[in-house]
Amino acid sequence: MKVLTKLVLALLLALVGSAAAQQPAGIFPFDYRLVELDNGFKTYLIKAGAPDQIAYVSIVRTGSRDEWEPGRSGFAHFFEHMMFRGTEKYPKYDDVIAELGAAYNAFTSNDRTVYYVLASNEYLEQIVDLESDRFMNLSYSEPDFRTEAGAVLGEYNQGANTPTFLLNQTVRETAFDRHTYGHTTIGFGDDVRAMPEGYDYSISFHQRYYRPENVVLVLAGDFDYDEAERLVRQYYSDWQPGYVPPQITPEPPHTAPRQRVIEYAGRTLPVLSVNYLGPPWSATDRLAVATEVLGQVAFGSNSDIYRKLVIEERRVQSLDGDFDLARDPGLLEITARITDPDDLDLVEREIQGTIERFRQELVDEKLFNDTKSHMKYEFLMDLETAQSIAFSMFPFVVSTGGIEAVNDYYRTLESVTREDVREAARRCLVENAKTVVIMVQEG
């Protein structure tokens, strides 16, 4: 395995060197072509991956973030379901995909809804036809809508019984007063239960957000550039623009820390969730990129606190520092699952002590350099298949509407200093911006 890893890394580094001759100082190792239609629809054609395979990934720049109207949370995720209901031309979407022998799925998060098809390249035109048709001509009856709303409610009820769901929902509700990041992707329970009555609203949601200006297609794999561009122009040019941006209220500055204790009715270890409001994602803002580095050096698997609490003392079963930034200012999350309830206060003091240390001191130079290298080469090592190449473009597409920022991001990462990491801690990990949620077993 180690030999294979070294060979793959050597190949990727060679690719980077090859691409650098055409794109100086760029990390992305593959050539690509941008196809931009008059209606605002963008397609990125990336020739890479296994022979004869393609990944067809449609990224809608709408997620739970865009659900700004009261009582309507959860509709972005709901549309993930409805998009498989078919059209007049292809009423049985699943059957058509099955005939092609393709794999397909979709998922929704805060800032995006993604639909993907993995198939043999011989079916490229059929897939372009099928996918463009459902994005432009989705059709479903009110009874179909109600049926799917019932399925979403079942999904909600199943998830609501888990400790992870309860913790996530409570953290968001506590940390946000105004911004739509205050609800989970699946939505508030009352809104999900009311969905069967929202047929007309669902039509409006689709008409506002599923427009060519708000969708980016990334086609990666083995194909002919000219033929792929011809198909995109043929099948997507008639898609009418009309995207209506959501009216999202920014989260006002917090003036005091927040804390809640919640009880889970089933069995669970105590979980401590410490959260701060971070900056929005940016490819060129050194503070933003330094914040992502901060999460790894302070609370990642190579950090001092992880080694102490998880590996050496085993007081904590798991410790995660998720400082991945979102399209708007979101949460920097530190989550510890604690082995012994009596250690809860001790673990909270250890986390606070780590935060204070990074606010005052410079990160260890070796850990800092190793972390930046890891972030860079982890990105490169993930570029193994057409699917992973397309998926690696998510943060760039969601925040900027294209993939060009990939090289900007890694140039900024290279320029980040230890002083930048300390400054990120001083600006972001502040007491007034902190939300602490503690989940314990009931009783």
Image (cartoon, helix red, strand yellow):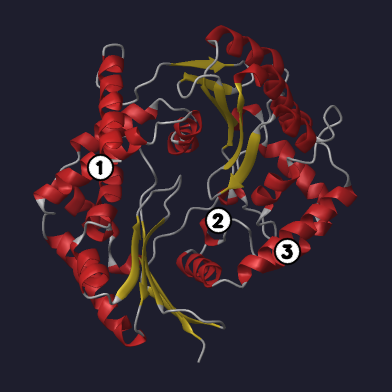
Residue drawn at (27%, 53%) of the image: 296
Q: Under tag 2, what secondary structure?
A: helix
Q: Nearer the viewer, residue 339 or 429?
A: 339
Query: Circle 1 sits on which residue?
Result: 374
Residue type, numbered disc 3: Gly
The vertical placement of 379 against 199, above or below, is above
Q: Nearer the viewer, residue 338 or 141?
A: 338
Closer to us: mark 1 or mark 2?
1
The percent position of residue 361, horizontal first and vertical second, equals 11, 59
Q: Residues within 10 Å of mark 1 (few under 14, many from 20)?
A: few
Residue drawn at (50%, 64%) of the image: 172
Residue drawn at (62%, 53%) of the image: 68
* Mark-to-mark CA distance, 1 and 2: 33 Å
Q: Residues within 10 Å of mark 3 (few under 14, many from 20)?
A: some
Closer to us: mark 3 or mark 2?
3
Residue type, numbered disc 1: His
* Mark-to-mark CA distance, 3 and 2: 23 Å
Q: Residues within 10 Å of mark 2 (few under 14, many from 20)?
A: many
Contact (CB < 8 A) between labels 1 and 2?
no
Query: Circle 3 sits on which residue?
Result: 154
The percent position of residue 330, horizontal first and vertical second, equals 43, 54
- What numbered label is drawn on residue 180? 2
Question: Which comes before the other along the chain, label 3 or label 2?
Answer: 3
Residue type, numbered disc 2: Thr
Left or right: residue 248 compared with residue 382: right
Contact (CB < 8 A) between labels 3 and 1?
no
Q: Under tag 3, what secondary structure?
A: helix
Residue drawn at (32%, 82%) of the image: 344
